[in-house]
Amino acid sequence: MLTKKRIVWIVLLLFSGIAAFIYRQQAIHAIQALLLKSLREKASVSNRALVQDPSVAEHLIYTLKGMERIWPHRVNSLRRFNYLYAGFAGFECDIQFDTASRKLLIGHEPADVAGAGVPSFTDYLRADPEHKLFWLDVNTWTAIISDLLRPAATPGPAIRYQAPHRYRIL
């Protein structure tokens, strides 16, 4: 038999379970942020001394210290990019080269870049006012290399001219 006390407990547990389900992503993000902050004192300040070639050590990535070197993985949507933007110095995103439009599109699998509304890498650059760093995981090297090696007489700009030099894309 259900007593009034048991009904109150059941309702309380039901509502707390619903709230936990609804706010699970925010809770996970908050826990991860706390864990990252607790590691801040233990993080390596720099590994510049490990680099043999002095010209490489001048790259912007070697100016990052400690926790700035931890970047979120698979930031393959502008929504995720905007959500994580303030908390990180850089981002990893997957790139697919679309031979039809000759653009770098964001997506891990070829099916991710099929259809309209897929963000291009230039959309990410426009959404990046602080010019943070990107780790580009290029999944279609064959298409990019064939585009770069095509004869100069072929009409249309090559992919290397689509990304402005001001973004320091190597």
Image (cartoon, rainbow, N blue to C red):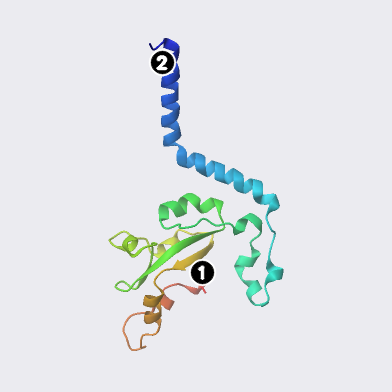
58 left or right of 26? right
| The N terminus lies in quadrant | top left
Determine the secondary structure under disc 2: helix
Q: How many marks?
A: 2
Question: In the displayed structure, would residue 2 be above or below residue 145?
Answer: above
Question: In the displayed structure, would residue 41 be above or below residue 99?
Answer: above
Residue 5 in the image: state x and y as whole percent.
Answer: 45, 12
Is label 2 in contact with label 1 (beta carbons under 8 Å)?
A: no
- Residue type at mark 2 is Ile
Front in this rendered view, residue 123 or 63: 63
Residue visible at 67% across and 55% down? 43
Q: Which mark is residue 7?
A: 2
Q: Which mark is residue 103?
A: none
Residue 48 in the image: state x and y as whole percent.
Answer: 69, 68
The residue to which callout 1 is attached is 167
Front in this rendered view, residue 112 or 154: 112
Residue 39 in the image: state x and y as whole percent.
Answer: 65, 49
Determine the secondary structure under disc 1: helix
Quarter of the image for residue 123 reads bottom left
Residue 19 in the image: state x and y as whole percent.
Answer: 44, 31
Alpha carbon distance from label 2 to label 1: 60 Å
Quarter of the image for residue 8 reads top left
Task: Identify the mark nearer the N-term, 2 or 1.
Answer: 2
26 left or right of 119? right
Quarter of the image for residue 119 reads bottom left
Question: In the displayed structure, would residue 38 be above or below residue 110?
Answer: above
Q: How many other residues sit within 10 Å of disc 1, few (<14), some (14-19) or many (≥20)?
A: few
- Residue type at mark 1 is Tyr
